[in-house]
Amino acid sequence: MSNRIKINEVLPAGYRAILALEKYIESTSLTPIHKELIKIRASQINGCAFCIDMHTLDARKAGETEQRIYALSAWRDTPFFDEKERALLALTEEITLISNHVSDETYKNAAGVFEEAYLAEIIMAIITINAWNRIGVTTELSPALCS
């Protein structure tokens, strides 16, 4: 068990602010599968075990298949994801790895397959999970063991 700071206890107002952003994301028109694909892929990249565990469980509850969850880290090399999901995953990766910037090609591809408001919701969802990942990784949140 980690002895690192518990943000929700030490800075409850800050934690509630991020939680409010998460609640907003949950109220958007993003499909449950799109939300979970974003959350899982960003969490894989960021190495947030807590979030990977949480969002793979949530994805299964939303109807996502085991095959697609297992293949998510290699999505480019599978036939399992449709055009919209591929655009969403590419954008998720580039925003998560922002120091490499978001390429015009990736952005134009996403803008070409999603309506503007939906694209904005995708971007906000990616930003939100990255904030959660940074809390989880920095404070060493760990997933609960299943019994």
Image (tube, grey):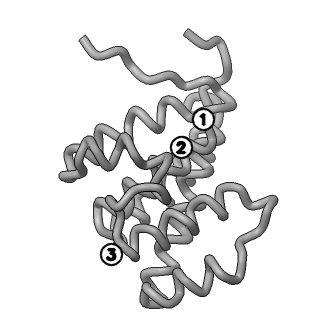
Residue 58 coordinates in the image, percent (x, y): 29, 44
Question: Which part of the image, by quadrant, shows the C terminus?
Answer: top left
Relative to residue 140, is residue 77 depicted above or below?
below
Relative to residue 86, is residue 139 depicted above or below?
above
> What is the spatial separation of the Cα atoms under label 1 and label 2, in whole angstroms?
6 Å
| Residue plotted at (35% across, 63% down) | 81
Q: Earlier in the sequence, mark 1 or mark 3?
A: 3
Q: Amino acid at mark 2?
A: Ser
> Dot 2 corresponds to which residue?
43
Residue 54 coordinates in the image, percent (x, y): 38, 36
Relative to residue 25, is residue 4 depicted above or below?
above
Q: Earlier in the sequence, mark 2 or mark 3?
A: 3
Based on the displayed image, in which of its 4 quarters is residue 146 positioned?
A: top left
Horizontal side of 130 relative to 104 (left or right) equals left
Residue 34 coordinates in the image, percent (x, y): 36, 64
| Residue plotted at (56% across, 45% down) | 132
Q: Nearer the viewer, mark 2 or mark 3?
A: 2
Question: Which part of the image, by quadrant, shows the N terminus?
Answer: top right
Horizontal side of 41 relative to 104 (left or right) equals left
**Which residue is more in the foreground, 93 or 70?**
70
| Residue plotted at (60% across, 87% down) | 108
> Dot 3 corresponds to which residue?
29
> Dot 1 corresponds to which residue?
47
Q: Is residue 23 visible?
A: yes
Looking at the image, do the residues carrying marks 1 and 3 touch, with CB atoms under 8 Å apart? no
Q: Nearer the viewer, mark 1 or mark 3?
A: 1
